[in-house]
């Protein structure tokens, strides 16, 4: 029985414009300026993969740097981009009504985002969602971001739930990958950059066209 739903935020509950290409270009430039090889990195490389590449170069001795210092610098750069973008944040149609319906059904609610605490707080406040969730986890709260499973596993621990009691909801392939790695079911909503077909091909357990479909979907799982 599903007792809690953990949501991705950007593209799942909230929409705003974020310069992914510009952000990742800046991160790659930062690594290059510190002596890292960036030949295997592009603006399509996930932030966690960029950090993983840097850590591998440190661990192998190819670069003399402190990983935690670099990680803090990268997160600080991301914070600036995210805070700027958060000014345009607004809830996706059906989000507020859906979350309220789930709360009335005694479903515990949480949010898990690759954004930092500062940016996520601004986005959630701007969208009227800050006080909806029992639990909010950001990249500042976990060792590794999605598609690593750390955030979902942390949520399970904090909520004292078993894996079959939690459903993760997201709009992207990395959300599916994180849920699979954590061993929980995942429902994908096609309100982000991925089609229903792509989400299905990547292994989503359930697929929605709108977040408004979630309450009825949960009833079929109980």
Image (cartoon, rainbow, N blue to C red):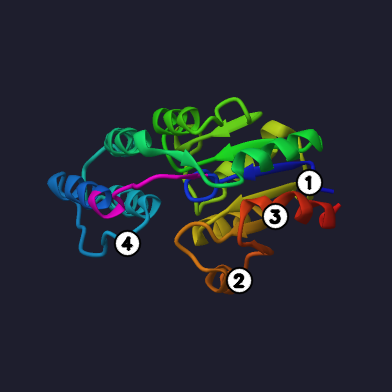
The x and y percentages for residue 11 are 48, 50
Q: Earlier in the sequence, mark 1 or mark 2?
A: 1
Circle 2 crowding by C-alpha within 10 Å: few under 14, some 14–19, many from 20:
some
Judged by depth in the image, the label closer to the viewer, 1 or 3, is 3
17 drawn magenta: yes
Q: Are marks 3 and 2 in contact (CB under 8 Å)?
A: no
Q: Nearer the viewer, mark 3 or mark 2?
A: 3
Magenta range is: 14-22
Q: Which residue is mark 3?
A: 213
Q: CA distance from mark 1 to mark 4?
A: 33 Å
Q: Residue at x 16, y 50 (%)?
A: 32
Circle 1 crowding by C-alpha within 10 Å: few under 14, some 14–19, many from 20: some
| Residue position for label 4 | 44
Percent of width and height locating residue 184 = 69, 54
Residue sitting at x 13%, y 46%? 33
Front-most of 24 and 169? Answer: 169
Q: Which residue is mark 2?
A: 200
């Amino acid at each position: 029985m599903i007792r809690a739903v953990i949501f991705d935020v950007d593209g799942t509950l909230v929409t705003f414009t974020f310069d992914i290409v510009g952000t990742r270009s800046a991160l790659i430039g930062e690594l290059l300026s510190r002596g890292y090889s960036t030949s295997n990195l592009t603006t399509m490389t996930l932030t966690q993969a960029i950090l993983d590449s840097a850590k591998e170069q440190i661990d192998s001795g190819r670069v003399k740097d402190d990983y935690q210092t670099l990680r803090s610098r990268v997160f600080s750069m991301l914070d600036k981009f995210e805070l700027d973008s958060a000014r345009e944040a607004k809830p996706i149609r059906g989000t507020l009504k859906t979350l309220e319906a789930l709360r009335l059904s005694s479903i515990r609610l949480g949010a898990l985002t690759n954004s930092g605490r500062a940016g996520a707080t601004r986005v959630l406040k701007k969208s009227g969602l800050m006080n909806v969730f029992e639990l909010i986890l950001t990249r500042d709260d976990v060792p590794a971001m999605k598609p690593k499973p750390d955030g979902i596993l942390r949520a399970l621990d904090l909520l004292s739930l078993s894996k079959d009691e939690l459903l993760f909801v997201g709009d992207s392939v990395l959300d599916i990958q994180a849920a699979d790695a954590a061993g929980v079911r995942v429902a994908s909503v096609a309100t982000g950059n991925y089609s229903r077909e792509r989400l299905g091909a990547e292994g989503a357990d359930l697929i929605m066209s709108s977040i408004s479909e979630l309450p009825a979907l949960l009833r079929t799982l109980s």
